[in-house]
Image: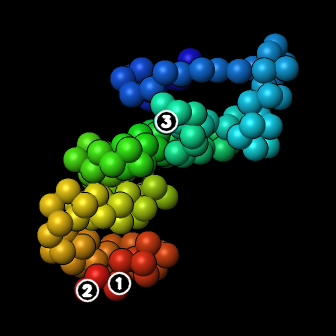
Amino acid sequence: MYTDPRVGDFINERFVPVRLHVKHQHDDFEHVGQRYGALWTPTILILDEGGEERHRIEGFLPADDFLSQLMLGAAHAAFRRNDYAAAEPLFTRVAEQFPRTEAAPEALYWSGVSRYRTTHDASALKDTARAFSQRYQSTSWAKKASIWQ
């Protein structure tokens, strides 16, 4: 379904993919769309085991941007189930592997928070703030992290 094997592999490793076609499965598509407020296609929803939305991707994206968003969503899902040790390497992977994507600053921020939640060592937050002083300075994520300096 995805032309870039990295995308398909990541999806198959991390998620239970479900696809609803707007024309061929119209009733199901409408029901799910109403439940989750999906107003556009494609809408990719990353849900937890209880069906709670943890991340959303709307519209088409190039492979690196899409993959970084999928990783970000998987990391957010792990974070929400308090599995900070699983979330942190995923957030870090996004920031390191896809530094030019929109997901990278958010991933850097949450990587630091995850590391702090795992270790309870405030230096994780200071390190993250320092990393923002070197990159992504003009993002809202850098502003949020600035308090940690």
The answer to which quarter of the image holds residue 109 is bottom left
Q: Nearer the viewer, residue 81 or 146?
A: 81
Alpha-carbon neighbours of circle 1 within 10 Å: few (<14), some, or many (≥20)? some
Q: Which residue is mark 2?
A: 149
Specify the amino acid type for callout 3: Asp
Residue 1 versus residue 33 in the image, above or below: above
Instruction: Measure how far apart labels 3 and 1 are at the Cα level.
Output: 31 Å
Inspect this view and state whether residue 127 appears: no
Tell me the element at label 3: loop
Asked whether disc 1 touches disc 2, contact meaning CB atoms under 8 Å apart, the reply is yes
Q: Nearer the viewer, residue 127 or 100?
A: 127
Q: Quick one: quadrant of the C terminus? A: bottom left
What colouring style does the render use?
rainbow
Tell me, for residue 48, which label it has, or none.
Answer: 3
Specify the amino acid type for callout 2: Gln
| Residue 7 x/y as whole percent | 44, 29
| Residue 111 x/y as whole percent | 29, 59
